[in-house]
Amino acid sequence: MHNIVFDHVSKAYGTKEVIKSLNFEIKEGERVVFLGPSGCGKSTTLRMIAGFEDITKGKLMMGGTCVNDMAPGARNIAMVFQSYALFPHMNVWDNIVFGLKIQKLPEDEINKRAKNALEMLHLEGYEERPVRSLSGGQKQRVALCRAIVKHSPYFLLDEPLSNLDAQLRQRARQELVKIHEVNRSTMIYVTHDQVEAMTVGQRIAVLHNGMLQQIAAPQEIYENPANTFVASFIGSPAMNLMTGNVNFDRMVLGSKTVQLPKGLDTFLGSGSVIVGVRPENVRIVPDGEAMLKGECQYTENTGNLQTILLHLPDQTKVFVQASGEPYHIHVGETVGLAFSWEDVRFFSDETGENLYVREKGAAQHGSH
Ligand code: ADP
Ligand code: MG
């Protein structure tokens, strides 16, 4: 069994707690992404798994064993560091096979693994080059090769593609997923890039201020963010968040009063609530059908996608994204906006929690 269990794991530097009571499991063979803004604790969490950081509180279990006091070398992990950590005076080949030689693997096994890795990361022909003569992107690929050849049951990667250009990054990411599909190690991939997270992760763990916000499949995170932080971190542009004021079966939204569908009124209670709707689910409509009014601030068209920013009367920003026929709209124009209630997510005005996720089982969209 090569699973990883965080049992209320916390980490403090002095009096500053940077990881706060992580409590979740990564299953054997799973590919999990740690996603969050810079400084949220992704590297620290990964380094605790690798054994390079002490655990202040709680228990970290790997394969059923508490590893709090286990040395890094005993944990059977392969790790790619954000800073590569290569031997600069050695050439590419020697860097890659160094660990395998220490393990005293047979020569032909070493050659096979190294050649495979070099091919996967498009580094054939670089074997003899000293590492210090390589670009950042090439060094990063050497560091990936060195980790891949270990064939460890745990594969930890800290922003492994951050120094590659966009095209190479996409290719390397696909290669990494393919490698994982074959070797089925327990893989944790750290990134601050949501697109990378969505494409690499079978599940994504979103971190913020050292706290786990949500761990779920990419689609679930996108469709049902656990709170307003996740809602505004995922998606480009992110989910629109507006304040609504519920009064019985009506809601005041950006100076307009709209009728709530049956069932929603009882689910929401009364008072302030945050209304979340993704840009692709907002439509520009004739005045008669409008639930909201917004003034166009800018519009851009990237060929297959039109993105429009509007301001509601209270200055709340609303993005509209359309992939079909573009809207003919100009800056300064005020237009009507509408959305379907089934595309709306509601969040607590006080805590930011997704009210539906919190009250699972509650009928979000009334009784059909
Ligand atoms: P991320 O990888 O998500 O960018 P880190 O895990 O590197 O974030 O850092 C999380 C927090 O811990 C940050 O606030 C950072 O300043 C702090 N931190 C990291 N390493 C140390 C350290 N050695 N001493 C004190 N604070 C640290
Ligand atoms: Mg980091």
Image (cartoon, rainbow, N blue to C red):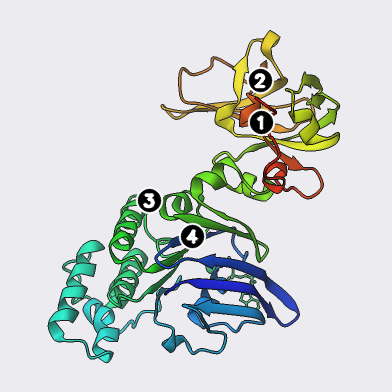
Mark earlier in primary sequence (2, 1): 1
Q: CA distance from mark 3 to mark 4?
A: 19 Å
Q: Mark 3 = which residue?
A: 166
Q: CA distance from mark 1 to mark 4?
A: 29 Å
Q: Residue at x 53, y 17 (%)?
A: 327
Q: Mark 2 = which residue?
A: 337
* Residues packed near mark 4 inside 10 Å, few (<14), some (14 to 19) or many (20 plus): many
Q: Position of residue 365 (x, y in %)?
A: 67, 30
Q: Closer to us: mark 3 or mark 4?
A: 4
* Residues packed near mark 1 inside 10 Å, few (<14), some (14 to 19) or many (20 plus): many
Mark earlier in primary sequence (1, 3): 3
Q: Closer to us: mark 3 or mark 2?
A: 2
Q: Position of residue 50 (x, y in %)?
A: 48, 79
Foreground residue among 236 and 309:
236
- Height in image: 108 above or below 226? below
Q: Which secondary structure, mark 3?
A: helix
Do residues under tags 2 and 1 come within 8 Å of each other at their CB atoms? yes
Q: Residue at x 37, y 59 (%)?
A: 164
